[in-house]
Image (cartoon, helix red, strand yellow):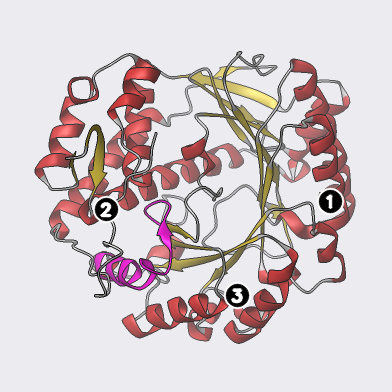
Amino acid sequence: MSSVIESLDRQLVLPYQANITTPDWMLRAMEKVMHYYVDKNLRLDTLSAEIMPAPQPGKKYMLYAHVPFCHTLCSYCTFHRFLFKEDKARRYFVALRKEMDMVKALGYDFESMYIGGGTTTVLEDELARTIEHAKTLFPSIKEVSCESDPQHLDSPGFKQLKGLVDRMSIGVQSFNDDILKMTERLEKFGSGQQTFDKIMAAKELFPIINVDLIFGFRGQTDEVIQHDLNMASKLDPRQITTYPLMVTHQTRKSVKANLAAPHHDMANQYRMILNTLNGQYNQLSAWAFGKANDEGFDEYVIDYDEYLGVGSGSFSFLNDTLYVNTFSLRRYEDRIINGKMGVEQQKNYSKKDVMQYRFLLGMFSGRLNRKYFRDTFGVNLDTALFKEMTSMKMIGAIKNDPSNPDELIVTDNGKMMGLLMMKEFYAGMDNVRAQLRKPLKQCDM
């Protein structure tokens, strides 16, 4: 899919003015529609699975590795994570490397590796050893992307990752101390200024630093949002990501009333983000901004149709099938010791389901392209997804590119819709994670 996101004509001097005209009722309606499709397609009606399929010739793959440990657990986070214990974490990294060996035996090679969590840097020496092992097994890996939180940026072992990690994404959330206090991050990770100083010192370690911000918190006024964006801009990182706060079914009671801003604030906050960052950065997706258009970022599913996940709680999407690794640390370790991969479940999706998923990603990334659908699915996008295309055109979310009949331009309204659609999709995935974690007993953690 090629990239076409409507942006400011670089010859103009005027600042970017986001043209988001979609009324609030329409945004709420879109969320309800997405909620319906997410509930329909992310049901846990899976079949058992023991092993991943072999790779198919001509396809490119991305390797995802999950590190499910954190020193502290944030109340609004529903990612798969456990409280850090060093002995368990070290055994886990050993198992993770053994599972990579099994993936190699299937015949896979990868162009890119993404390591997520949890907090990937809980044991920098084990993480470094794991990346080195992956690069030895899979020599085609050209880039490694990793996540961390501000707590680890000045730890003695953090410098071990220099030369191994190409892109380090740092979960800042906000530079405002009141927001940090409300989200229980002030005592854990320090003040906004302390985080700023740590990131500035860590910039020299990695080719790409990404600063993760979250908007949509209660009390996050226009002034707070602008201050966060200004602080991030002063750091001058290669990338800035601005996620909306995602309130899932599992976090709704604890988060919505206490942390989440009213729904109608989101469009105005997003408008501020577009106006501030467009011009300084290229827009990589609805919520990601980068200095260059061709560098990797968090939403690896945009650049890779297929990816394989290793580690407890990881997902894989291969041959139109979703594979789910066990969420139990005990079962994961037992499976690897007995020569089995971590995968336990699988769910196959229809061609229509996958096309709708790719349409969602095209809206989110601004890479909606008729040729991609012809080449990948053998269909005419306008007729195969008639309802989706017609509705997006009617609300001014997409329009034809006059210079290329295969391209569709995603407007600012479309970016807003793409953001909401992806937010609901990720909230649905978080609900799946929470349901898979629910049966876990103490012995599984």
Q: Horizontal placement of 63 versus 330: left or right? A: left
Q: For marks 3 and 1, give the one nearer the viewer.
A: 1
Q: How many marks?
A: 3
Question: Which element type, helix, strand or loop, lies under badge 2?
Answer: loop
The answer to which of marks 2 and 3 sits earlier in the sequence is 2
Q: Horizontal placement of 185 versus 299: left or right? A: right
- Residue 94, compared with residue 282, is above or below; it is above
Check whether the beta carbons of the residues at disc 1 and disc 2 lie within 8 A of each other: no
Task: Please name the residue that numbered disc 3 is placed on.
Answer: 185
Task: Please name the residue that numbered disc 1 is placed on.
Answer: 128
Mark 3 → mark 1, Cα distance in angstroms: 26 Å
Q: Nearer the viewer, residue 109 or 37?
A: 109
Q: Which image quarter: residue 180?
A: bottom right
Mark 1 belongs to which amino acid? Answer: Ala
Q: Position of residue 302 (x, y in %)?
A: 46, 39
Residue at 69% across, 65% down: 72
Q: Position of residue 385 (x, y in %)?
A: 22, 25
Question: Which element type, helix, strand or loop, lies under badge 1?
Answer: helix
Packing grade of label 2 (10 A; few <14, some 14-19, many >=20) is: some
Residues shaded magenta: 267-287
Magenta segment includes 285: yes
Mark 2 belongs to which amino acid? Answer: Glu
Mark 2 → mark 3, Cα distance in angstroms: 36 Å
Checking the image for residue 22, the label placed there is none
Packing grade of label 3 (10 A; few <14, some 14-19, many >=20) is: many
